[in-house]
Image (cartoon, rainbow, N blue to C red):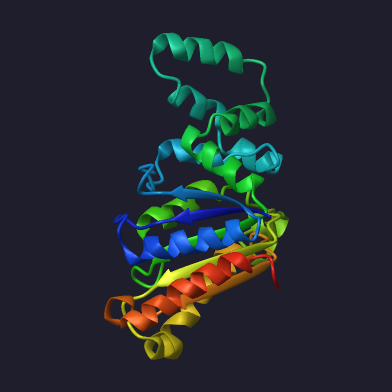
Amino acid sequence: MRVLTVYAHPNPKSFCHAVLQEFTKGLEDAGHVSEVVDLYAIRFDPVFRMQDFASYVHESMPLEILEQMNLKQRVLDFAGGPIQRFIASRWLRNKDSLAVAKFIHDHRPKDVVAQWEKLENAQGLAFIAPVFWLHFPAILKGWFERVFAYGDAYALTSEGWRGEAKGRVPLLHHEKALVISTTLFKEEDYKADWEAPMTRVIDDWGLRYPGVKKVEHVYFYGVPVADDETRRSYLERAHKLGKGFAQS
């Protein structure tokens, strides 16, 4: 299986990085093809900016929605100086909304396109990161916001375009996603109150709803306060999770 692991921790000497190493070693020991995206190492920009709206314009959208977006004006607004605007206006003259939508989507940010291609080519996904405010670190959350775009990760039916969540159409094809979260606090706190909202937001909304067939979320609790034996057991489990990734 081709597995893409998206990793988010700023310290290459962290315990979280040791988890990454053991997990990827397990994948390789089992014969999987492993690719790692280290978001801090590549300095991925997690901030959704004006140019990112191009990722949310797609020729598969209903024509009336595309026409409401005034796409020709968007192209002119981002064309640049007077010469570029003149060239753009001539190109736009005989183009309908579908053609303009395709043009805009084809010109979404290059770093997003590169990440989407890695995601699309993978059969399985893994995410390894510490828990920040009961979610992913901002750099990884921003990766989802920028990469899981309309027409790629999901689409909408007519119900969805009326604002109904049941109109969301999954487009991802991945067999499995594994989330490994390292925590500061202990297991009883997460089991009592905190895992449920994380499951709902990260696992269900972020991965199951877009179409991932199986989602597993593993927590390594209380890492900073754990004893050496517990830490060793976490690393051993990370290796086993990689080695047994394809198992149900």
* Image: 103 above or below 12: above
Of residues 237 and 206, the one nearer the viewer is: 237
Q: Is residue 164 visible?
A: no
* Image: 52 above or below 197: above
Residue 241, percent from left and from top: 57, 70
Of residues 117 and 167, the one nearer the viewer is: 117
The tally of labels here is 0
**Which residue corresponds to the image point at 30% horizontal and 58% vertical from the top-left?**
13
Residue 107, percent from left and from top: 54, 29
Left or right, residue 14 beside residue 83: left
* Image: 177 above or below 39: below
Residue 214, percent from left and from top: 67, 69
**Which residue corresponds to the image point at 44% horizontal and 25% vertical from the top-left?**
78
Of residues 130 and 172, the one nearer the viewer is: 130
Left or right, residue 153 beside residue 179: right
The part of the image, by quadrant, that contains residue 9 is bottom left
Residue 15, percent from left and from top: 34, 66
The part of the image, by quadrant, that contains residue 175 is bottom right
**Which residue corresponds to the image point at 56% horizontal and 26% vertical from the top-left?**
72
Quadrant housing the C terminus:
bottom right
**Which residue corresponds to the image point at 57% horizontal and 30% vertical from the top-left?**
104
The part of the image, by quadrant, that contains residue 204 is bottom right
Quadrant housing the N terminus:
bottom right
Left or right, residue 71 beside residue 235: right
Q: Is residue 110 visible?
A: yes
